[in-house]
Amino acid sequence: MKRNGQFLKKILPVCFVLVYAEGCGQESPSCTEYGDTCYYGVEMNGMLCGYSVETKCRGQAGGRDLLFENSAVTLTMTLLGAAIDISIISSFGTDAATGKPALIDLIYDTGKSKVHSHTVIRGDTAFFESESSGISRKVALTEDVIVSSQSRYPYLVKAFDGGGSTTVRFRLYEPMRGDIVERVYNKINEEEATLADSLFHTLVIEETDIASGVKTMLWISRDDGYNVRALVAGRNIYLTDKSVIGRIRMVDMNEVMFARVNKVIPGFQGMEWLKVSVAIDTYGDTVKAENLSFPGQKFTGTVSGSFVEGVFEIEPPLYDGSGAPPFPADYASAPELLRYLSPELMIESDDPLVRAEAERITAGAADSWDAAQRLSRWVSENIMGALPGGGSALNTLKMREAECGGHSRLLTAFCRSVGIPARLATGCMYVPYYSGSFGQHAWTEIYMGDAGWIPVDATIHETDHINAGHIRLGEKATFQPQHMEILDYRIKQQ
């Protein structure tokens, strides 16, 4: 069987990384299908919970004849009792005359939240657009930048086949965010793999994303450069047959997202100090041991690749607003804060609706801490908890419901829209579920001048602080626990 179609190798771990979009205004090309239809199975935690249907077609867009590789992924799962169905649609178009990349569309949809990124490539420039987040940019595609489908790796076959180098580094265009990323590829070995009743001669290659630390094991067909199997973040994705559609089951993400510690802490939100032993795998940020210690959090241990092992001591400082910056404040002399004052995907701080609401809430605020407190309380009191929730800041504001990511992004966007630097913090938090456990979580950090970054958690109504059950891993880090054990803790005396 010849391998055709597109293969989306990186399946999102949970719903709260998804965002809302209203479309990017591009034409939806009509296509005439050709070639084989291929199917992939997606396993999480050892359970078949999704599949992908891969097709090819010919069509037109922007006045050009294009050849498209299309992928439609369906995933089904539960988290905290809520059923979550995720759809991932991707399309990679090449110019039929020149064979050069021309158009890339990606859509992630949970039913309540959606992200739609769109790239048009003309000459040596990629025109990226994400309308809902207000992001539109031109990206220079220099000669060393590779633009490829998310499953086709002819450049790796060329680099490795023939017994040459075993390690190479490439710069690639990343169509989800519209930027350039660097990835390192190590050839592990060569294998014969039987999938969907077909034999493939494959190169087994480990891919490492430099910025995020994400490692993916790829089985790439030496014949055509397509990926026929991938292992990434506990997901096993592999070529199979059409019967996969009727065999999928709903996977319980609680077993993936929570680390049980079997210790119930009454009044856990009053916890002011915590000591916990951890073995955590993480990706999304490049985690270093020295970055895991800061005022309020001390880490003793090691970080090997993406694996964190050691002991955390958490004792968040309480901030009373002393010395808070004025409102509004001037950060023109602090260029390092610019990124935390600017809009980004999922944090639409420049959207008129977000800005108008933030300005209404903060009108007459005495200083930046007063303004931040007003915004934090508003999000806590007006946004209901829900899964999968609103996802992005703007969609959360419109829907008035969200998971922790939606709460945190909306508060971050509110702050940025009125000139207060803010950012997401991600990691895990102690919760009483399953007789005590740590679950993946996100909250917000707000910059208060000399006092630094002040963490707050609007999701659980900690609008001016966080309790000691929060372990910060990064700004985009995921939480994939192997083992956690509470060694000691202290509850604040009333």
Image (spheres, grey):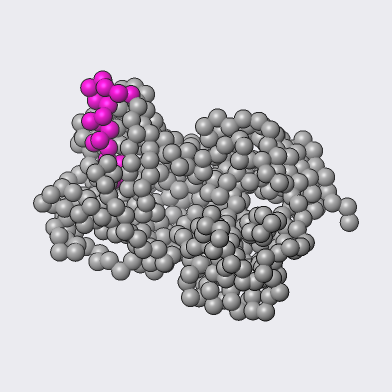
Classify residue 41 by image quadrant.
top left
Q: Position of residue 17 (x, y in %)?
A: 49, 54
Q: Can you see residue 400?
A: no
Q: Is residue 343 magenta?
A: no
Classify residue 235 by image quadrant.
top left
Q: The C terminus appears in which quarter of the rendering?
A: bottom right
Q: Residue at x 61, y 35 (%)?
A: 289
Q: Is residue 159 magenta?
A: yes
Q: Position of residue 79 (x, y in %)?
A: 56, 51
Up the image or down, 199 lies above or below 111; here it is above
Q: Residue at x 73, y 40 (%)?
A: 313
Q: Residue at x 57, y 63 (%)?
A: 331
Q: Position of residue 83 (x, y in %)?
A: 52, 55
Magenta residues, as a range? Answer: 148-166
| Closest to the observer, 412 or 5 | 412
Q: Is residue 469 left or right of residue 119?
A: right
